[in-house]
Image (cartoon, rainbow, N blue to C red):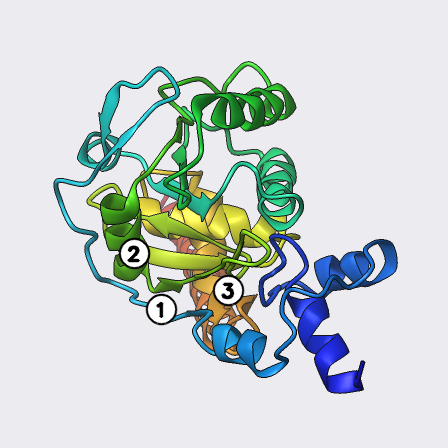
Amino acid sequence: MTVRSLSLSMAFVSASVTVVAAPRAAKAVERNTPPPSFTQDAEQPLAALQDVDVIEHLGDKIPSGLSFRDPAGHKVELDALTGGNKPLLVTLGYYRCPMLCNLVLDGLVKAMKQSGLIVGRDFQAVSISIDPDEDAKQALSTRGRIWASVGGQADANSWPFLLGDNVGSHMLADAVGFKYVYDKTSRQFAHDAVSFVLTPEGRISRYLYGVDVLPRDFRLAMVEAGAGRVGTSFDRLLLSCFQYDPVNRKYAPYALGFVRIGAGLVFLMLVTLLTVLWRKELVMRRRRVA
């Protein structure tokens, strides 16, 4: 096997059949999983990988009328999840995924806990399968594990795990720019490690990449999507000092924001000083008159 074909096979390991956006996940695959041969033609995986991508559609509104099924078979309208006053965290994947999808979910739970935000109180979440052949048992298994990790806050209202079909899942994936490919030989899906943050109105606000999301980025993304309805006043102040860096795909210090805050503090100090001096001068005048 050539170095080229070996590297291509490695990129197709299970759910990280995907171009893993997080280097740590790729290293874990490299250490623990022998490279399977998904096809005898090295050019076939390359062609498939060319179709795996994330094309950001920031500001776009997801289509209305999309519906999915919960593990009990009940119809769930996505509009019902975006019609409230909380941002919505969306993950697309599949529950029988042997690696990447679970890593993405685990990373979000970790970031969520460390951020101090609570699902159901500060935001809502939904996980939707892109595999039309998955059954309720697979969804229930993943749901149970994640709900247990989150704690008592997660339930069917705050974080449902839904089953999709070829129509609804594809429409939602196209709307958020989530390009994935099904490999018939391995029976796995190739896709990136990414989750999506929607505003309460259903507009795409932010993309969270990788399996190890920074708690600060998670919190700021929710505060930003919530437009002041999530987090504290300090969070909104912090958001003015940090701006999303699309190159590094994370929030970075915003120099102008710090300058503005510094100027504001100097102004407040100056006003305070002048007020104190004016009061002292007023007291001295009154004493002279007396």
At 19% from the left edge and 55% from the top edge, which residue is drawn? 61
Nearest the eye: 104 or 278: 104
Q: Vertically, is 133 above or below 140?
A: below
Query: Is residue 78 toward the left or the right of residue 112 in the image?
Result: left
The answer to whether the residues at label 2 and label 1 have Cβ atoms under 8 Å apart is yes
Give residue 170's position: percent from left, percent from top: 29, 53
**12 on left or right of 47:** right
In the picture as drawn, the residue positioned furthest to the front comes out as: 40
Residue name at image x 44 percent, y 45 percent: 91
Q: Is residue 71 above or below residue 166?
A: above
Neighbor class of circle 1 (other Cα within 10 Å; few <14, some 14-19, many 20+) is some
Judge left or right: residue 21 versus residue 240.
right
Pointer 2 local density, CA inside 10 Å: few below 14, some 14–19, many at least 20: many
> Which residue corresponds to mark 2?
204
| Residue that sits furthest to the right in the current view | 31
Q: Position of residue 278 (x, y in %)?
A: 40, 57
Please tell me which residue is depicted at 40% across the width and 26% down the height of the picture.
160
State the residue position of label 1.
Answer: 56
Q: Which residue is mark 3?
A: 242
Task: Classify residue 164 by image quadrant.
Answer: top left
Three-letter code, disc 2:
Ile
Distance Cα–Cα, label 2 vs label 1: 9 Å
